[in-house]
Image (cartoon, rainbow, N blue to C red):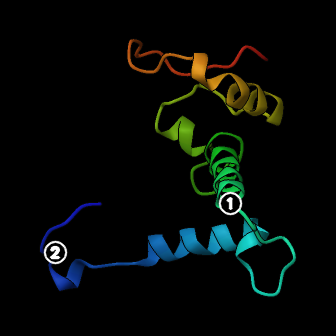
Amino acid sequence: MINGNPAPAHICTSHVERQNLTIRMMCRRFTRLTNAFSKKLANLKAALALHFAYYNFCRVHATLRVTPAMAAEVTDRVWNLRDLIYYLNFAPHFRFCDSAQPISPIFG
C-alpha cells in the first residue's frame, strides 16, 4: 500500500472499483445468495489465486489487446489453461530472482 497526502483533485477510485466488479463477475463466490461460497479461508485463497493467474496470464484484454502479463513483459505469449496448471503445480521449482528472462512454460 502506498501512503501519502494526495491532492483531492487527483484521487480516483475507478480502477479499484473496476477490479472489484471484475472479481465479483468472474468469481461467483463474491455474489450474494450463491451456493459457491468458501467455507474455508484456504479454499477462498486458492480460488482467488487461480482467478488472478487466469486474469493476468490467459485472458486477452480488449483495451490492452494482450494479457496484463505480456503488457508488463513478464511473459512473451498468451498462456492456455494447460500452461497455467502446469506452472501452478511446479511453481516451487522455478527460480524468480536469478534471471531477467520472461517466464515461458514448456508447452507451446
Q: Quadrant of residue 39?
A: bottom right
Say whether disc 2 or disc 1 marks the residue closer to the N-terminus.
Answer: 2
- Residue tagged by mark 2? 6
Q: Position of residue 3 (x, y in %)?
A: 19, 66
Q: What type is the residue that disc 1 sits on? A: Leu
Say whether residue 102 is left or right of residue 12: right
Tell me the distance, in whole angstroms, between the alpha carbons under discs 2 and 1.
Answer: 33 Å
Residue designated by label 1? 44
Question: Which residue sits at x=64%, y=61%?
Answer: 41
Considering depth in this image, is 101 or 42 the residue closer to the camera? 42
The percent position of residue 7, horizontal first and vertical second, equals: 14, 79
Task: Name which residue lies at 64% across and 39% down.
Answer: 57
From the viewer's perspective, is 92 left or right of 59? left
Q: Nearer the viewer, residue 72 or 34?
A: 34
- At label 2, the amino acid type is Pro
- Quarter of the image for residue 96 reads top left
Using the rendered image of the protein, determine whether residue 76 is visible from the camera's viewpoint. yes
The crowding category of the residue bearing disc 1, from other C-alpha atoms within 10 Å (few below 14, some 14 to 19, many at least 20), is some
Asked if the residue under mark 1 is in contact with the one under mark 2, i.e. CB atoms within 8 Å, the reply is: no
Percent x, y of residue 20: 57, 73
Give the residue drawn at x 41%, y 13%: 99
Q: Secondary structure at mark 1?
A: helix
Q: Is residue 95 above or below residue 16?
A: above
